Amino acid sequence: MEPFRDVKSKLIPLDMINVDTDQIIPKQFLKLIQKSGYADFLFYDWRFDHSGNPKKGFFLNDPKYNERQVLLTRDNFGCGSSREHAVWALFDYGIRVVIASSFADIFYNNCFKKGLLPIYLSEDEIEYLFNVVNEKDPTVEINLPKQTVSLSEKEINFDIDSTRKKMLVEGIDEINFTLHFNDQILNYEKSSKIAEYNKYLI
Amino acid sequence: MQKTLFEKIWDNHAVIDNTLVENAHDTNGPSLIYIDRHLIHEVTSPQAFASLKQTGRKVRRPGLTIATADHNVSTENRSLPIVDQVSKRQLETLSNNCKEFGITIFDMSNPDQGIVHVIGPELGFTLPGTTIVCGDSHTSTHGAFGALAFGIGTSEVEHVLATQCIWMYKPKSFLIDVQGSLRKPHAISAKDIILHIIHKIGTNGGSGTVIEYKGKVISALSMEQRMTICNMSIEGGARAGLIAPDETTFKYLRGRRYSPKESELDRLIEFWKSNLKSDLNAKFDRVETIEIDRLAPQVTWGTNPSMVVDVTDSVPSPEEFADGDENKMKLAIRALEYMNLEAGTPITDLHVDRVFIGSCTNSRLEDLIEASMVVKGRKVSTKVRAMIVPGSQKVKLEAEKLGLDRIFKDSGFEWRESGCSMCLGMNPDILSPGERCASTSNRNFEGRQGAGGRTHLVSPIMAAACAIEGHFVDVRDWL
Ligand code: SF4
């Protein structure tokens, strides 16, 4: 995984709660067998009509939002299906940070595997951000080591646990990391804890 | 110390608890959890295998993973060649990967093929006290056996293949005590109970938690009904659902392909009986009591599974739904527009074009038996196209032995081969734009069953009755 670099960008506002992964990437695009090439399918059913023409008024069809790297949204983003394709599609499109008041667990987890940074803020902070986007459309700066979202007049701190932060900042390959603990895994496999359950299939 | 069932399973599987070597003080860090059972399917595994190959890694314990082809398989005649070339490639990729890495696969030609969460239990692969993962959010289904079972993403599928473990932040525990008793046990099913629970707690009410369901109502449910409950825990935002194993569970396990042999099983059952339950005074992070005494058949009206009403009610207004919350208000307005519904319309006035009975929520033998009870001797409305998709080839075979296929076909239902089918519409079984469907699946998101399709989630009995009448009805009057 590529290490996460600081991001400077204007925001893409998606003013909605409960955006589910079926919307982020509809099922018809889950048939591919590779991890990239999903940018064109991001929010497909909201972006294109039934004959495949861009729908007016949807933000991804507005050139103003091209090249922006930060998505601003609300509660329970990424709920529903566990498809990691949702993260891949956002990432392929160029989005590097999603700011929301909460995320669905599996989606949140999946973000870190690709190097997408999910930031959760309080409802008030989210409200504030929506307001400034509508008024001034400012550029924000996201600094992961410092855990800040900065605007010219304000700096907002965000929480992230230290392990996940380290993974992103250093772009650590999780499997390699886990394999450092191979001895512990072997010990576990030999221990009595496992005996009651899965010696039937080896 | 008094522990919850979830904590017991967690403790028993923590290879490393709450630590990073260079960060041992970080008690909020993830733990390394050993995985006993891994299920894979064609959609979320190809990238995991590709990456294993790229890095030259092996599958650590091939015997702990099984595979099935379910998400995009055709539910029509299996002897015909697959028309969709992209699906075909995905299915072939799965078969090749399994062959290369030595993983058992139940593919389209296998008599044990079926939806991953239907065949896991059916094969006895799902056992109490185990940890079970699958690249699919409805892995929570297996929690019905007292297993800690949850969905993971593709990178984690790869991680489990390579290490047989995953890093996990310890979820919180949430106890839902289901009180009361069902007045019309046939007309009101496990599906109605879980829809009602989601309505009460909301789509992210269970966020960050493992829900344990208990109460007399839960104990009285069959394994298949318990699976329906645990299956939709994810719709309430939870990582997993859990029901402590009991005699019903143990009985279910006997004689299944991967279940331990009799004498071994008896010994294990003794162990499970004394170990796999929450201690009397165990502390949960959250407790809710849900009353189901007067529960009516439930129907979703909107575009998320918490938008639920009684069949005897009307489509709510955005104000009623939002209860002062502006964001929920917007959501409800959008949902009504998408669903093409007007507030105040009685639910029983809603006409459907399609009926789908299937999915890992409701496609097991009991579901089909229940549906057949209301279908028998009646005809599907001429305005409705109705479809039954058994959850597995075994369910299909057993149903056919009972003559259910005849009952359904005689009344005008299509009787299909097993798979996910119209639950997510990755195969040709989809709704056309604007079509309205009564579905026994688990998600009513926009476009879930086909772009522009309108989904109402219901129980198998409700779906069956809806097919006959062409609109929603209070099935309590029928049974
Ligand atoms: S039936 Fe639906 S919910 Fe279940 S595994 Fe298949 S697609 Fe997922």
Image (cartoon, grey):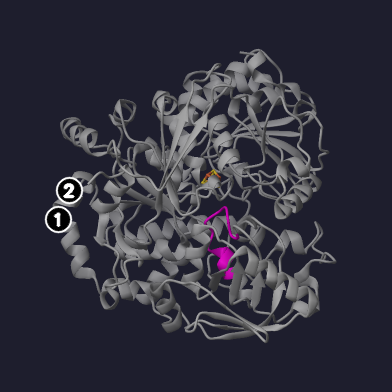
**In contact (CB < 8 Å): disc 2 and disc 1:** yes
Residue at disc 2, CB closer than 8 Å to ligand 1: no
> Could you tell me residue B238's position as x and y percent?
48, 49
Toward the viewer: A193 or B117? A193
Which residue is denoted by mark 1 in the rendering? Answer: A191
Q: Is residue B30 magenta?
A: no
On screen, residue B83 above or below B365:
below
In the rendered image, is residue B110 in sight? no
Chain containing the residue with disc 1: A
Judging from the image, what secondary structure is the residue with disc 2 in? helix
Q: Which residues are magenta?
A: A77-88
Residue drawn at (14%, 57%) of the image: A190
Q: Amino acid at mark 1?
A: Ser
Q: Main secondary structure of the magenta part?
A: loop
> Could you tell me residue B81's position as x and y percent?
58, 48
Label 2, label 1: how many angstroms apart (C-alpha)?
Answer: 7 Å
